[in-house]
Amino acid sequence: MRIEERLAELGLTLPAEPAVPPPATGTLPPDWVRVVGRRVLVSGHGPLLPDGRPAGPFGRVPDEVPLEIAQESAQLAALAVLGTVQRAVGDLDRIAAWVTVSGFVFAEPGYRHTTAVLNAFSAVVHDVFGREVGAHARTAIGAATLPLGVPVVVAAELELRS
Amino acid sequence: MRIEERLAELGLTLPAEPAVPPPATGTLPPDWVRVVGRRVLVSGHGPLLPDGRPAGPFGRVPDEVPLEIAQESAQLAALAVLGTVQRAVGDLDRIAAWVTVSGFVFAEPGYRHTTAVLNAFSAVVHDVFGREVGAHARTAIGAATLPLGVPVVVAAELELRS
Amino acid sequence: MRIEERLAELGLTLPAEPAVPPPATGTLPPDWVRVVGRRVLVSGHGPLLPDGRPAGPFGRVPDEVPLEIAQESAQLAALAVLGTVQRAVGDLDRIAAWVTVSGFVFAEPGYRHTTAVLNAFSAVVHDVFGREVGAHARTAIGAATLPLGVPVVVAAELELRS
């Protein structure tokens, strides 16, 4: 339980399961994670409140949501991803490696600092897991829009210890 | 051939190989799928007509293509992906697991319902493969534009039985 | 060293490690690649100058950067990816297979030729690695914006020989 201790040390609390509006009648709710062998594939997560509801502010970076606030959203998205992974695998110490992080920023056309938003996500990963386990390939793409208007959505792949 | 029976039961027909305009002279046509070991990586697919040509309507969601129509495009994209996978692996019963679905919607800036478009894709996967095999991690990103102006493009990874 | 010979034959030179502005104090620089077992996950790369600095022109396709120029940027991005992979694995002959290429074009809303931009990336891969090793699944998405305003960013996954 070293990772859980590290989270406590950093004062970080993982939110509840994402509680987003359900899809229309007759369709299943989305899967937040898919574990296939040692691979842990995490769906796109936005920032969540502690109870799992989407966390504001909503809107475009930087004209509606300034960079500093979007970075806080990215931190909350990181905690949301960790919460989902923890529920799926039981113990975050089972993570051998972060593999990839696919980050999307709801951004004004031509905004040049989507990487700065995602750096806040990566910083949480590095702080919690350390450099060796936490290293990850990453993209930081500007999206025309994101679900519910959240400023940032991140999908990820992690690998479990054998 | 249970999956093929299930497709017939649902009245679903898979389209022919994607027939899109070829690239400029001297470059190879794109690969629609790459099979590496048990991993099946599927290129981004848009909606196709039965003969493999891109299926309209073309345009942005929701101002040019309303949500309900974009959901039909997402269903056609799902069938296009299944057609490509079937041609690559021979028999859809070889699929052990859907792994990830990366969905992109050609969307108006700030449109908040890209997940609703992708739910139509996921519903086809769940209906055809069932919950256990069909479960998948997913992203639903709003793109500034997509090839040929199709309203939705989906890439995916699936895993074969060992 | 057959791939290196092939690069020389084609007159292609790989740039130095990406030299992009560092993140804010206290955060680690991004990882350009993550090797996990035989999998080589490459972060999003834009076009680079020989010394590793971002290569212009910067701007949106096609209104600020015409297609032909964006294709040159895509070629430079391909060389940047190869440089990163070479530094990570030592010898490009260790590549058994390209797996996926995720391409993002900083594009005008509704621009329909993002695939044409990415074809220039894929052409480098095919020219250098040949059809069998170089085959890859691909997406070609239009982004609202990209880091630093580069016209194209490409992430990739490759597999090493066992």
Image (cartoon, coloured by chain):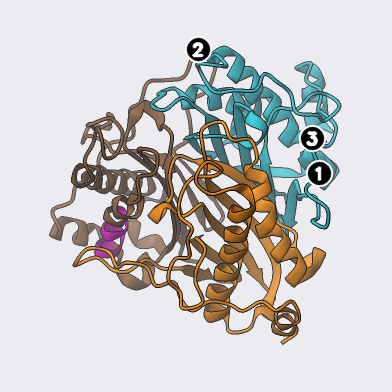
Chain colours: A cyan, B orange, C brown
Look at label 3 and name its amino acid. Answer: Gly
Q: Chain of mark 2?
A: C
Can you give x and y, in whole percent of width and height, for residue C126 in the image? 29, 64
Q: Are marks 2 and 3 in contact (CB under 8 Å)?
A: no
Q: Chain of mark 1?
A: A
Inspect the magenta stretch and tell me whether residue C126 lies in it: yes
Between label 2 and label 3, give the one nearer the viewer: 3
Observer-nearest of C31 and C46: C46
Inspect the magenta stretch and tell me whether residue A81 lies in it: no
Observer-nearest of C112 and A65: C112
**Stretch in magenta:** C121-128
Callout 3 environment at 10 Å: few (<14), some (14 to 19), or many (20+)? Answer: many
Q: Which mark is residue C25?
A: 2
User: Can residue C56 be seen here?
Assistant: yes
Q: Which mark is residue A83?
A: 3
Can you give x and y, in whole percent of width and height, for residue B46 in the image? 50, 60
Q: Is residue C37 above or below residue A70?
A: below
